[in-house]
């Protein structure tokens, strides 16, 4: 049986928010049966889809003198 393609998460995104906002996020995530990180990740992914950029392959511009 072929392995399913998994979305491996290897990068951490650190943000600073107020304790009040963190409590609200935790409460909403819990009410939807999700971990806080999963809920925030879904917000980001859904916004990227809405903007139409998720399906594109985004590559940073090459630095002068580097080959792509």
Image (spheres, rainbow, N blue to C red):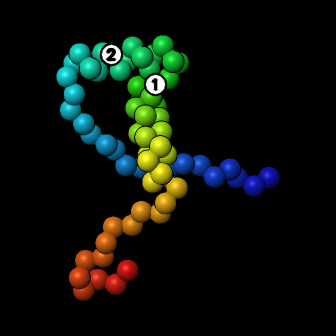
Residue 11 screen position, x and y as percent: 37, 49
From mark 2 to mark 1, how far is it between C-alphas?
13 Å
In the displayed structure, would residue 3 be above or below residue 42?
A: below
Label of residue 24 in the image: 2
Identify the element where label 2 is drawn: helix
In the displayed structure, would residue 28 be above or below residue 44?
A: above
Please tell me whether mark 2 or mark 1 is closer to you in this view.
2
Residue 33 screen position, x and y as percent: 53, 18
Residue 41 screen position, x and y as percent: 43, 36
Mark 2 neighbour density, 10 Å: few (under 14) some (14–19) many (20 or more): few
Q: Which residue is mark 1?
A: 35
In the displayed structure, would residue 28 be above or below residue 5?
A: above
Q: Nearer the viewer, residue 25 or 8?
A: 25
Q: Nearer the viewer, residue 21 or 55?
A: 55
Residue 13 screen position, x and y as percent: 31, 43
Identify the element where label 1 is drawn: loop
In the displayed structure, would residue 37 be above or below residue 47?
A: above
Quarter of the image that includes the C terminus = bottom left
Q: Which residue in the rendered view is the most extreme toward the right?
A: 1
Please give the count of numbered marks on the rendered protein: 2
Residue at 48% in and 39% down: 46
25 horizontally vs 53: left or right: left
Res 18 quadrant in image: top left
Kindly indicate whether the residue at mark 1 contacts the one at mark 2 (C-beta within 8 angstroms).
Answer: no
Label of residue 5 in the image: none
Mark 1 neighbour density, 10 Å: few (under 14) some (14–19) many (20 or more): some
Residue 45 can be seen, yes or no: no
Residue at 34% in and 44% down: 12
Residue at 47% in and 35% down: 42
């Amino acid at each position: 049986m072929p392995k399913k393609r998994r979305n491996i998460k290897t990068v951490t995104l650190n943000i600073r928010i107020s304790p009040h906002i963190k409590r609200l996020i935790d409460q909403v995530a819990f009410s939807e049966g999700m971990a806080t990180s999963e809920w925030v990740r879904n917000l980001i992914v859904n916004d990227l889809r809405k903007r139409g950029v998720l399906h594109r392959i985004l590559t940073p511009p090459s630095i002068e003198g580097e080959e792509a």
